[in-house]
Amino acid sequence: MKFRTWTCGFFAGLIATTVLTAISLTLYFSGIIPLSITEYGARFILHIPDKPMHIGTWIVGLVTNYSLGGLFGILSSYLYKITGPEEKIIKLSGVAFCMWFFQLAIVPALDPNVAKYSTYDTAIAYYIFYLVWSIVATSFIIKYLEFPDTDNSMTK
């Protein structure tokens, strides 16, 4: 089956978001990070400042994350299609930075309730999360589906 750019990017974003969510929730429930990506998304969409999370809010957080993951996957896929598979490391860093900036600069400006969650430890953890997301989505999935005839090594 030949994947089109939009479909390829959307699925790449969903798969990468699954990896991101699993890592984030694992670190959150083990007490290593103060706020998971899912909780951050739920608190932003529902404007919940410090209330405890329940199953409905977690579902909203997951829907938010997967929707944004699919959107950024589509944007990444078009970036790859327009610019080609060269200079992967710069593209990975650029996509990760855009996602990180969106989450920690634009989202708090839109909702002051989540601004207090933009701390240095959250910023560092989320940047690492988005690098992982970019590696999974941009480098592996989009590259294999969109450019199957090119060399798939990370070193070029």
Image (tube, rainbow, N blue to C red):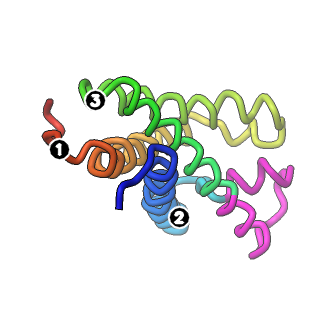
Which numbered disc flags the more N-terminal residue, 2 or 1?
A: 2
Which residue lies at the image location 47% right of the left edge and 65% below the top edge? 22
Magenta segment: does it hold 90? Answer: no
Q: CA distance from mark 1 to mark 3?
A: 19 Å
Mark 3 or mark 1, which is nearer the start of the sequence?
Answer: 3
Q: Which residue is mark 1?
A: 149
Outermost residue to the bottom: 55
Q: Quadrant of the N terminus?
A: bottom left
Task: Using the rendered image of the protein, determine whether residue 32 is visible from the camera's viewpoint.
Answer: no
* Region rendered in magenta: 39-63
Q: Which mark is residue 55?
A: none
Residue 67 x, y percent position in the rendering: 64, 53
Q: In which quadrant is the C terminus drawn? A: top left
Q: Say what amino acid the circle numbered 3 marks.
A: Ile
Which residue is label 2 attached to?
25
Disc 1 crowd, CA 10 A, few/some/many (<14, 14-19, 20+): few
Q: Residues within 10 Å of mark 2 (few under 14, many from 20)?
A: some
Which residue is identified by label 3? 89
Q: Secondary structure at mark 2?
A: helix
Choose mark 3 or mark 2, whichever is in front.
3
Name which quarter of the figure residue 29 lies in: bottom right
Amino acid under label 2? Leu
Q: Residues within 10 Å of mark 3 (few under 14, many from 20)?
A: some
